Amino acid sequence: MIDNYNKSDEGEYSVENEPLKNGNYVIQTNNTIQQSLSVNEEAKLAPLATKWTFWLDSQKNKFSSKEDYEAGLEIISTVETVQEFWSVFNNIPAPNRLANRVSYHLMRQNRKPLWEDRENENGGIYTYRCSRTKTNTAWQELCLAAIGEQFSVIDGDDIVGISIQSREAQLDIIQIWNMNPSEEAQKAIDKTILQLFPDNIFPVKFYKANSSHVNFEVKNNQQ
């Protein structure tokens, strides 16, 4: 089981490390990740069903254009095995250490965490508000459920991303990206959430189709 994998403390990001305000964060983190991977390179690899990519989103202005928003996105690392996942997850600061409005995204394959991305434009996002005291646990459990393909989804749907955004208020934002905005698909996601979090740690939730955003922009590629 993915959640029983023996997570090594080698290279783990400690509380004393510099916060995400450092402009060289992604480079420094990737160096630590590579060191962690080299330590475990002799371990038997457990492949994931698909690749997943960790993104850092430092765009703090909610009214940014698509171009400005993309400029604030950086790939942290792409993982294809359980070991690679933990090497990244254990070496990035926990969500409760992120600056206000800074986000992590874990996206399937190489898709970007953009509503307008062609791979996302027909899907939607379930948004939850989560107490800051429970954000780290929720982020970990949702990431594990995603890469472990544990979500109950209907035919024609798939979970394609998990996001976490830090907020200065008491409630952070957690999002689940899917491919099918139907009510049936939403109920299937709800079912998994109730199984993962029977104590119902999300006081607020809502779903929105990506194409319904006011500033939705579809980029038409013309040959």
Image: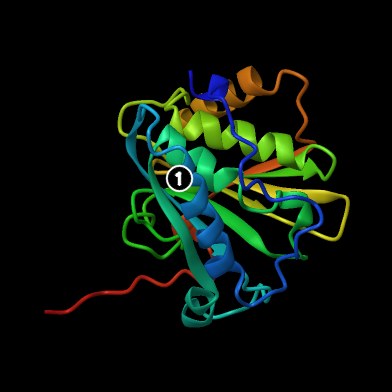
Task: Choose between 138 and 40: the one closer to the eye.
Answer: 40
Name the residue at 53% across, 48% down.
Answer: 88
Report x, y in % for residue 131: 83, 42
User: Secondary structure beneath disc 1?
Assistant: helix
Give the quadrant of the C terminus: bottom left
Identity, as a three-letter code, of the amino acid under mark 1: Leu
User: Which coloring applies here?
Assistant: rainbow
| Residue 209 appears in the rendering | no
Name the residue at 51% across, 70% down.
Answer: 73
Q: Quarter of the image holding residue 16?
A: bottom right
Q: Quarter of the image holding residue 3?
A: top right
Task: Choose between 1 and 71: the one closer to the eye.
Answer: 1
Is 75 placed left or right of 118 in the picture?
Answer: right
Report x, y in % for residue 76: 49, 60
Report x, y in % for residue 211: 44, 59
Name the residue at 37% across, 63% down.
Answer: 117
User: Mark 1 highlights which residue?
Assistant: 37
Question: Which residue ends up furthest to the left in the rendered image?
Answer: 223
Is 171 placed left or right of 219 in the picture?
Answer: right
Report x, y in % for residue 206: 65, 43
Q: Is residue 37 above or below residue 30?
A: above
Q: Quarter of the image holding residue 202?
A: top right
Task: Choose between 89 and 123: the one closer to the eye.
Answer: 89
Is 18 placed left or right of 148 in the picture?
Answer: right
| Residue 168 appears in the rendering | yes
